[in-house]
Amino acid sequence: MTDRHNHDHDPDIFDRGLAADMETFYSRRGALKLLGAAGLVAGGAVAAITAGGAQAATAAVEACVGKVPTETGGPYPADGSNGPDILTQSGVVRRDIRSSFGSFTGVATGVPLRYEITLLDAASCAPLAGAALYIWQCDKDGAYTLYSAGKLNENYLRGVQVADSTGTLAFQAIFPGCYSGRWPHAHFEVYNTLAQATASSTPRLTSQLALPPANCATVYATSAYSTSLANYRRITLAGDMVFRDGYSRQMPTVTGDLTSGYTAKITVSV
């Protein structure tokens, strides 16, 4: 399973059709087998909760029912595995990823979307304090910086954050667009430490987040996302090459509205 982006760029090695993408760009991380089992996780969760009572323990067990599935990083990771490597650049560690950094100056426009992600160890349900997460996504028109035509000299909508003592981190982004053949999504990689992330080491997990249908329909009905609307109407979660085998652990809970922006919250067991 790989990403396919065919909007607004010249034919090159990144646009030779879905079959070629699947063969060429299947991430070196996407072939990893899932580790752990739900039965082991539930027992570890109870032991990990030392305070907060039965309600907190129950919530932790539910959040750690299983490890988030490993998915392909797709053809546009910019992590050094396929062309550009943004992770080694000064400035990549930031909370607001709407603007480019370094020598680039572009800014992504669109409906505000804040990601709030809590990282837990799948074996113990303990917070992964100090772990680093790299997130990247397309813009409102479905284009990826550093790869798509007209975006080669931009690096917005990419960034790294470090989890706090509760395993939580956040990014300010925009609601991603929908491009042909893929359900609206964001990519992420989890690293054990910030040093490993910024050295482009092998991540602990590579996966994707699926945006909820109701929010997608609302956002894409706005004029700013007119490019995405037609693509969205032609794709379903059941037909998406990544999420068709399940997405229950990859779909955040999204709250908010078009006026104030949205917040997407999810717990990721690694």
Image (cartoon, helix red, strand yellow):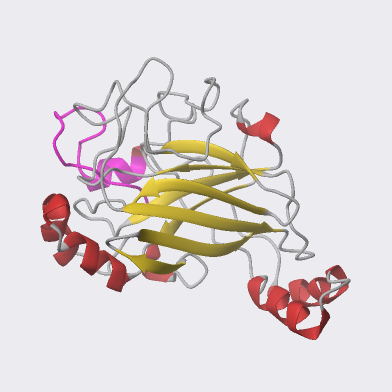
Percent position (x, y) of residue 92?
A: 51, 29
Q: Which residues are magenta?
A: 1-23
Residue positioned 47% across, 66% down in the render: 252
Numbered marks: total: 0
Percent position (x, y) of residue 7?
A: 16, 41
Question: Quadrant location of residue 82?
Answer: top left
Question: Quadrant location of residue 167?
Answer: bottom right
Percent position (x, y) of residue 169?
A: 60, 50
Percent position (x, y) of residue 183?
A: 29, 60
| Residue 84 in magenta stretch | no
Chief secondary structure of the magenta portion: loop
Q: Residue furthest top?
A: 103
Residue positioned 79% across, 72% down in the render: 45
Of residue 54 and residue 260, the one placed in the foreground of this image is: 260
Q: Residue furthest front?
A: 260
Task: Quadrant for the C terminus, please.
Answer: bottom right
User: Residue 128 vs residue 160: left or right?
Assistant: right
Residue positioned 49% across, 46% down in the render: 171
Asked if residue 155 can be seen in this view, the reply is: yes
Q: Residue furthest bottom?
A: 54
Asked if residue 237 can be seen in this view, the reply is: no
Question: Quadrant location of residue 127?
Answer: bottom right
User: Residue 251 vs residue 60: left or right?
Assistant: left
In the rendered view, would you say 102 is above or below 146? Answer: above
User: Residue 44 vs residue 128: left or right?
Assistant: right
Residue positioned 13% across, 36% down in the render: 8
| Residue 3 in magenta stretch | yes
Of residue 179 and residue 255, the one placed in the foreground of this image is: 255
In the rendered view, would you say 112 is above or below 57? Answer: above
